[in-house]
Amino acid sequence: MGLGVLGVSPAGARDPLGVFNAWGAFRDKTPHRCYAIAQPDPIRSKGDWRPFASVANWPERGVRNQIHIRLRKNRKPDTPVTLSIGPRKFELVGGMADAWAPDPRADAAIVRAMRSGEWMIVKARGEKGGGFVDSYKLRGLATAIDAATVACVRR
């Protein structure tokens, strides 16, 4: 995983918890959150920004294992974003360049599938036409999620 996907943050704002194969785990102090994050593998074509997938915990908000997908370019409005893990397919909701599970129950189902899967595929249609696909290796994900969960509890 290239850690460049994480961007630049103020010194001390982000604590690295470890890199586990394709996934990294981090804790942010403000706002307090802990998350596992990865880039697609391989990045198939250039987009408007760096895509990523993350699974985050926001303790003060009571949010656990929330899925967030950053698409590599804006999607066409009113078109689906589909996440596939093996035979399971999930339709996500979102804005122009981001997608999430529609509710906490869907987050939990997606994370269960991710923990037992090998690959995750995200498909969307670009705002200028044409579909695009990002693939994520899931090896290391479970350990990264567990590291992030423990870090938020041990704050």
Image: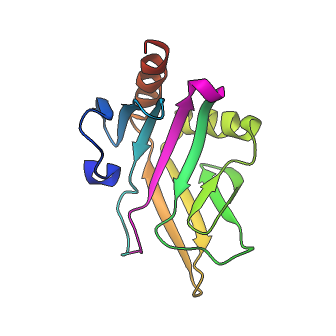
Q: Residue 113: in sight, yes or no?
A: yes
- Residue at x 61%, y 38% (from the top left corner): 66
Residue 2 in the image, given as x and y percentages of width and height: 26, 51
- Residue 80 lies left or right of residue 51; in this view the side is right
| Residue in the foreground of this view, choosing between 10 and 96 | 10
Q: Which residues are magenta?
A: 47-62
- Please check the rendered image and state whether residue 54 is part of the magenta-colored stretch, yes or no: yes
Residue 62 in the image, given as x and y percentages of width and height: 66, 25
Q: Is residue 127 above or below residue 65?
A: below
Give the color scheme: rainbow, by chain, secondary structure or one colour: rainbow
- Residue 14 lies left or right of residue 51; in this view the side is left
- Residue at x 38%, y 63% (from the top left corner): 50
Residue 106 in the image, given as x and y percentages of width and height: 73, 40
In the rendered image, the quadrant that contains the C terminus is top left
| Residue in the foreground of this view, choosing between 125 and 88 | 125
- Please check the rendered image and state whether residue 21 is part of the magenta-colored stretch, yes or no: no
- Mark count: 0
Q: Residue 2: in sight, yes or no?
A: no
- Residue 154 lies left or right of residue 116; in this view the side is left
- Residue at x 62%, y 57% (from the top left corner): 99
- Residue at x 57%, y 79% (from the top left corner): 126
Q: Residue furthest bottom?
A: 128
Residue 118 in the image, given as x and y percentages of width and height: 48, 43
Q: Is residue 67 above or below residue 134?
A: above
Image quarter for residue 44? Answer: bottom left
Image quarter for residue 43? Answer: bottom left
Q: Residue furthest top?
A: 154
- Residue 96 lies left or right of residue 25; in this view the side is right
